[in-house]
Amino acid sequence: MPNILVIDDDTKILEVIRMRLETNGHFVETFSDPLKALENLREKEFDVIVTDVRMPQIDGIELLRRVQRLCWNIPVILLTAYGTIPNAVEAMKYGAFQYLTKPFEGKELLAEVERALGKNGNDQEPVGSKLEKHFPGVYGVSPKMKALYPLLESIMASDSTVLIQGESGTGKELIAQMIHYNGKRKGNRCVTVDFGATASSLIESELFGHAKGAFTNATENRKGVFELADGGTLFLDEISSLSVDLQTRLLRVLQEGEIKRVGENSMRKVDVRVIAATNQDLKEQVKKGEFRLDLYYRLAVLNINLPPLRERHDDISLLADYFLKNFSRKMKKAPMHWQEGVLDAFMEYEWPGNIRELKNIIEAGVVFSKGEVVSLEDLHYAGFPTEILENGFERLSDEDRNGLSLPEVLELQERELIMDALENKNWVQKGAAERLGISPRVLNYKIKKLNIAIPS
């Protein structure tokens, strides 16, 4: 039975829509609060969303955008009053499946729901399901990423300082941008400064600006990033690289909301939300005396820890397919696909450079590919460490290797590893999945794919 989610702040309209859809064989859940509806979307699967445009908290168009960013391939039908038709038409560009003008006929709504479900022979992909609308590296379907969603929703609704921690390449800057453009300050600037890529002698001027003549080559007054971001958000990347002296000045700004340009005596008021990021363990740096404890607490009012890609196995193929499609289009190549065994090889690799490494390797692989298939050989030229694959050949005897392709060898290895893990955990799939570092859902898929018989 199709599952339909209906959102409208008018409870009478909700009941009318519910009755119409349930009468025609659909299971319906209704919400008058769009934020609670989004929370429900993370727990349950829905086939179609029907939502009003004008609602408190967030409107239907913003809800549509959030559904897209969370990589949910769900067609969204907007319900709009006459005065908001231009907005609804604009929303079609953002990926709405369709919009209906209030008051509408029940049959009209039902027809659009059926069309969205593909029951009228229209198998065209809804615009809103296009993968290029998503935010790869930020969202995914893995348990660790899903666990971040409620936290991110709360952070976006607040104005507090945020500390994002995670390995290089996990998408910290993208998270910061997402927080800004979905928060109260989205109408103002989001300014980035990377302490790791800025000369230490220039950081003070970069942060606070300088007066003309403050130092050699200071030929004019210059605003720093705090002034440039006034009213908006300042993203401080690699905050762990900041010297102790500048940590003291940064703490004072965060506490008092005032900055002083280099070479000036007057203070200037600034209103900035700070989001800091680091690939280091700041608590460990505090213990070593390399980072101020009081600054750490001031920055870490809200904390986000991004998991590395090796802990997000469920997301690897999703991200790989996205990048492959994106680079194929950018390079004006025909739609491309993977050679058999490539995604399995991706799953075996540890990805020390995380999503950035995956993205770069796929971009180079698309460049080196000669046809519509990206092969393991293309990826080898792109820098993918295929020694992990070659080692697989060495573990088999010459007789075993004879006549086998690389994908076949990989499959045999994968089957052997899964069997070992299952036997070690007395055939308990959850325990075996933890041992293998993958989710139970992925393990279940591989058991079926490899035709592994589970003892009854």
Image (spheres, rainbow, N blue to C red):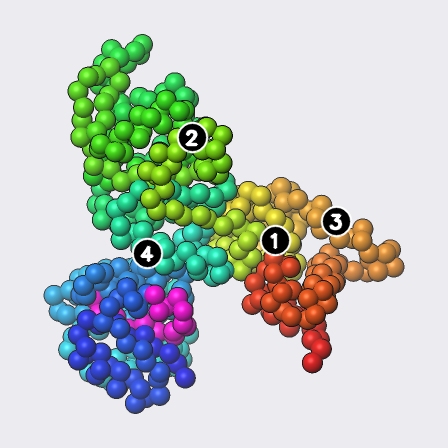
Mark number, residue 216:
none
- Rounded to the nearest angstrom, the CA distance separating label 3 from label 1 is 14 Å
- Rounded to the nearest angstrom, the CA distance separating label 3 from label 4 is 44 Å
Q: Which residue is mark 4?
A: 153
Q: Amino acid at mark 3?
A: Glu
Q: Residues within 10 Å of mark 2 (few under 14, many from 20)?
A: many
Q: Which residue is mark 2?
A: 291
Foreground mark, 1 or 4, reads 4
Q: Kindly indicate whether the residue at mark 4 contacts the one at mark 3 (C-beta within 8 angstroms).
A: no
Q: Which residue is mark 1?
A: 346
Q: Which residue is mark 3?
A: 390
Q: Is residue 422 above or below residue 401?
A: below
Q: Kindly indicate whether the residue at mark 2 contacts the one at mark 1 (C-beta within 8 angstroms).
A: no
Q: Quadrant of residue 23?
A: bottom left
* Lower sequence index among marks 4 and 2: 4
- Which segment did they paint magenta? 39-53
- Residue drawn at 27 percent across, 34 percent down: 254
Foreground mark, 1 or 2, reads 2
Q: Quadrant of the C terminus?
A: bottom right
Foreground mark, 2 or 3, reads 2
Q: Quadrant of the N terminus?
A: bottom left
